């Protein structure tokens, strides 16, 4: 993937970020959405490892660095107005810090929000609580 | 779907918006991402017809109102931190104003961005250019 060609076509927002939708390459399940700076987008495209920008921590965020649940890029797409990215990835373990395969594990139902996603790991065992 | 339960759980950004990822219910293809206010989210949940907020026009945007390419909600999910929605919809015609089935019709390749999406309508014939 030519990083310069894609970076030139992306419109970053006023904070210098672009949203990235992340889909499982094997199942097409939407796993998460996160944000990238130009720098973390370039690092993702050149390394093949998904790297984001954490808005809450205001720092570079290598997905899976603490959990081991890394994501390897398989495909990248840009939308018509150039302000949203869509990635397909190979997901190691689960994408969500809660232990679910996808961050979208809660479904809106007549009975309210129901957690019906697939839990694939125990967050207490994965993240060091010390 | 209970609109109040979902609305209570959503965190809107400083502009009062929440991003909504839209997936085709039949194929799981990601069609687009758009934004909703509390009002257009409530209208979507109660009517079953996808209604967004146009950031460029700063107005309520009933998907398909001019093109006829409406979207009917089949499923709604909320992510772990409550700031992104994921919808599955039945898409009439194509989702993108360019005539492609998905707004993500451009793929990043070694040769640059390549339009490899499926074109399903002629935008000149659908949108009144007068």
Image (cartoon, coloured by chain):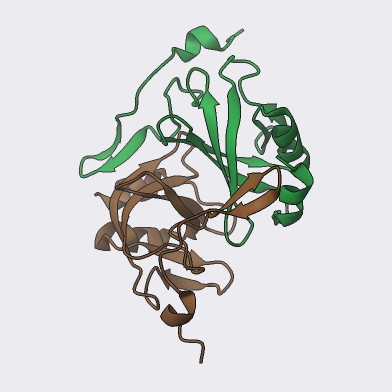
Chain colours: A green, B brown
Of residues A69 and B84, the one drawn nearer to the viewer in this rendering: A69
Whether residue A16 is visible to the viewer of this picture, yes or no, is: no
Q: Quadrant of residue B101?
A: bottom left
Quadrant in which the C terminus of chain A appears: top right
Residue extending farthest bottom: B130
Q: Is residue B89 left or right of residue A67?
A: left
Q: Position of residue B122 (x, y in %)?
A: 45, 74
Residue extending farthest front: B111
Whether residue B98 is visible to the viewer of this picture, yes or no, is: yes
Vertical placement of A63 versus B113: above or below?
Answer: above
Q: Is residue B46 left or right of residue B97?
A: left
Quadrant in which the N terminus of chain A appears: top right
Of residues B93 and A54, the one drawn nearer to the viewer in this rendering: B93
* Residue in view at x 66 percent, y 39 percent: A55
Q: Position of residue A63 (x, y in %)?
A: 62, 25
Q: Is residue B5 left or right of residue B58?
A: left
* Residue in view at x 78 percent, y 39 percent: A39
- Numbered disc total: 0
Residue extending farthest left: A110
Q: Position of residue A18 (x, y in %)?
A: 66, 48
Vertical placement of B123 versus B1: above or below?
Answer: below
Vertical placement of A58 versus B56: above or below?
Answer: above
């Amino acid at each position: 993937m030519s990083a310069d060609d894609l970076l030139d076509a992306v419109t970053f927002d006023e904070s210098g970020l672009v949203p990235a939708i992340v889909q499982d390459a094997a199942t097409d399940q939407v796993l998460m959405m996160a944000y990238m700076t130009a720098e973390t987008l370039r690092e993702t495209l050149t390394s093949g490892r998904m790297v984001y920008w954490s808005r809450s921590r205001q720092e570079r965020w290598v997905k899976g660095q603490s959990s081991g649940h890394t994501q390897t890029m398989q495909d990248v797409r840009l939308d018509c107005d150039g302000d949203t990215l869509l990635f397909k990835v190979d997901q190691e373990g689960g994408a969500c810090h809660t232990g679910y395969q996808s961050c979208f594990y809660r479904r809106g139902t007549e009975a309210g929000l129901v957690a019906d996603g697939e839990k694939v790991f125990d967050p207490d065992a994965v993240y060091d609580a010390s």
